[in-house]
Image (cartoon, rainbow, N blue to C red):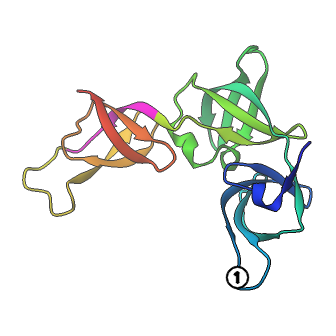
Amino acid sequence: MSILEYSEITEKKFIVLDGQPYEVISSHVFRKQQRKPVNATKLKNLMTGKVTEYSFHQSEKIEEAEIEEREVKYLYNNRGEWWFTEAEDSSKRFQVTEENVGPQGKFLKANTVVTQLTFNDQPMGFKMPISAELRVTEAPPGIKGDTATGGQKLVTLETGATINVPLFVNEGDVIRINTETAEYRERVTK
């Protein structure tokens, strides 16, 4: 357990504030006129998902959270229940809620290995792959001259997720998407 100075609280760090684990989303150290410097941060509570703003002053120190990671394999989801198993031992299955998986879960294919984050043996969430390659299962045909809306159409992927893609993407194509922003990146195969 290490202690961080106010200026060491930077993006992507995990800290403990009021007994709860937080991820630092953004931080900015600045000084107002003759005052002492402060670190203005945006923190995401890893248990509830709530984002708050907090300013750390020069004299403050904060405990760095010890987040444990373990590899788990996604199996399937049904009625808001997401089922996983330990990567090494497939007999140890467990279920989490849709809120715990987060919005990136809609891009998970069966048997995908992801990292589960835990704090004091309590599951908090998952570290998902940033990009995923998925097959397009439903795509309306692109109509020639239909570029008034920027040349985009809504398609359904093999996981059931829907995203906007360029008009040239057809049913059966495999596309690469950014799971953090839910945006199309490129077509992998025709």
Label 1: few (<14), some (14–19) or many (≥20) C-alpha neighbours in 10 Å: few
Quadrant location, the C terminus: top left
- The stretch in magenta equals 132-140
Q: Position of residue 21 (x, y in %)?
A: 83, 52
Q: Which quadrant would residue 138 be assigned to in this image?
A: top left
Q: Is residue 116 shown in magenta?
A: no
Q: Which quadrant would residue 52 be assigned to in this image?
A: bottom right
25 vs 81, nearest the viewer: 25
Q: Position of residue 161 (x, y in %)?
A: 45, 43
124 vs 142, nearest the viewer: 124
Q: Which quadrant would residue 81 be assigned to in this image?
A: top right
The answer to whether 17 appears left or right of 158 in the picture is right
Q: Is residue 135 shown in magenta?
A: yes
Q: Position of residue 125 (x, y in %)?
A: 72, 43
Q: Element at badge 1?
A: loop
Extreme-front residue of the structure: 34
The answer to whether 68 appears left or right of 184 in the picture is right
